[in-house]
Image (tube, rainbow, N blue to C red):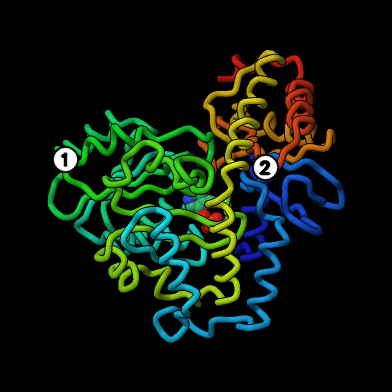
Amino acid sequence: MTISAEEILAQRLERLDELSLRRSLRVLSGRAGVHCRLDGRDVVNFSSNDYLGLAGDTDIGRTLAGATAELGSGAGASRLVGGHHEAHAALEREFADWMGAPRAVFLPSGYHANIAALTAVCGPGDTIFSDELNHASIVDGCRLSGASVVVYRHADAGSLAEKLGEAASEGLRLVVTESIFSVDGDEAPLAQIAALKRPHGFLLMIDEAHAIGCYGPGGRGLCAEQGISREMDLLVGTFGKAVGASGAAIACGDLLAELAINRGRTFMFTTATPPAVTEMVRAAIRRARDAEDRRKRLRENAALFRAGCQKQGFSIPGARAICPVILGAERRALLAMERLWDSGFYVQALRPPTVPAGACRLRISVSAAHTTDDIGGLAAALTEALGPHDQSKDE
Ligand SMILES: *Cc1c(COP(=O)(O)O)cnc(C)c1O
């Protein structure tokens, strides 16, 4: 008896249900932001990446209305075949200036940017050294490049040094890591990694998705904060998180920028971001760059939440905006998420394949737009939601 394709597909979905790995969409209505309406319910959102509270900014939104009236709705083609607009060129100049890099290449998203950078630079015969917790877009870019991939232990420069020493040295070598990791908000040891460049020889690519706009002098990110900008060959900054818009850019030198345009598959084979949207992203970038007050607020809120949790008897590692609460089993994370939802807080439970099996967690992200009450309320609700369970026993 043969099984139909439909039955096979239905089984795959059921399997996700059985493993508590099924995901579903909640519908946002009205404006995005930390105070929003999800599935028809007003909630305080601790799940967004809107770190500076700019995603719902109507001034930036009005730039789009004005630009669309002038420029229309689309770019008409990919950048290489007539879709390259003055707005794209201006954005690239401005982002390069902000990062202190010679050039920048703009892409429709961070997912596109990581794949463009990795496929532009690396090919078969080359070796990419990748942190084991790097984002899916980096993992996919590594695969698509055709290079050999060597995975080193998470945020461990010693493990990286070991792998660099072991691996064959023909072809190009590239090390890629996030600066602030998206899952737990912890940091890559950037200075230690940069120090390996001289003895081992490699190109260094840093994904600053969760750091651009948030940290470093003028919001330039963690490489700038740690003084290693000169060691960095490719920096990916995204505009959908702290910047509150969408898109991403690779900051790099001339040679790598030309390669990204000529070999980056997700640059070459996708329609250019609409010029009007690009004008809006430019406005959003300027706004985020100058938002020193919001950066200060973000730091204060992250410290306030950690202090609130400490008072309730549990501690949150790290010091940045992303606050992980590690719970272990899928069901436990989902239950905590549901309980928080019932208390009016939207918090995301991370499950495989986002995190390793058995390491499910709540990923709480604090924003500059949260009020003191939001933060105190969540710390209290979290204590309730986790119940009498002792957090330390699950690890
Ligand atoms: C979100 C994210 C991306 C992808 O950026 P998008 O603009 O959302 O496509 C890339 N890298 C990391 C580390 C991220 O967290």
Residue under the point 27% across and 59% down: 122
Q: Residue 374 in the image: x percent, y percent?
A: 77, 33
Q: Residue 190 in the image: x percent, y percent?
A: 34, 36
In which quadrant of the rendered image does the C terminus lie? top right
Q: Is mark 2 within 8 Å of ligand 1?
A: no
The answer to whether one can see residue 16 in this image is no
Task: Classify 10 Å Cα crowding around label 2: few (below 14), some (14-19), many (20 and above).
Answer: many
The answer to whether one can see residue 112 in this image is yes
Kindly indicate the quadrant of the structure image that contains residue 325: top right
Residue 47 image label: 2
Side of 281 where 163 appears, left or right: left
Location of residue 358 with respect to 37 vertically, above or below: above
Kindly indicate the quadrant of the structure image that contains residue 359: top right
In which quadrant of the rendered image does the N terminus lie? bottom right
Observer-nearest residue: 146 or 223? 223
For mark 1, what is the residue?
198
Q: Residue 387 in the image: x percent, y percent?
A: 76, 19
Identify which amino acid the numbered label 1 is placed on.
Arg
Identify which amino acid the numbered label 2 is placed on.
Ser
Task: Classify 10 Å Cα crowding around label 1: few (below 14), some (14-19), many (20 and above).
Answer: few
Side of 284 where 374 appears, left or right: right
Secondary structure beneath disc 1? helix
Observer-nearest residue: 327 or 100? 100
Q: Residue 347 in the image: x percent, y percent?
A: 70, 38
Residue under the point 78% across and 56% down: 27
C-alpha separation, residue under disc 1 versus residue under disc 2: 39 Å
Observer-nearest residue: 56 or 199? 56
Residue under the point 84% across and 33% down: 343
Which of the marked residues, 1 or 2, is nearer the chain's N terminus?
2
Side of 109 where 361 appears, left or right: right
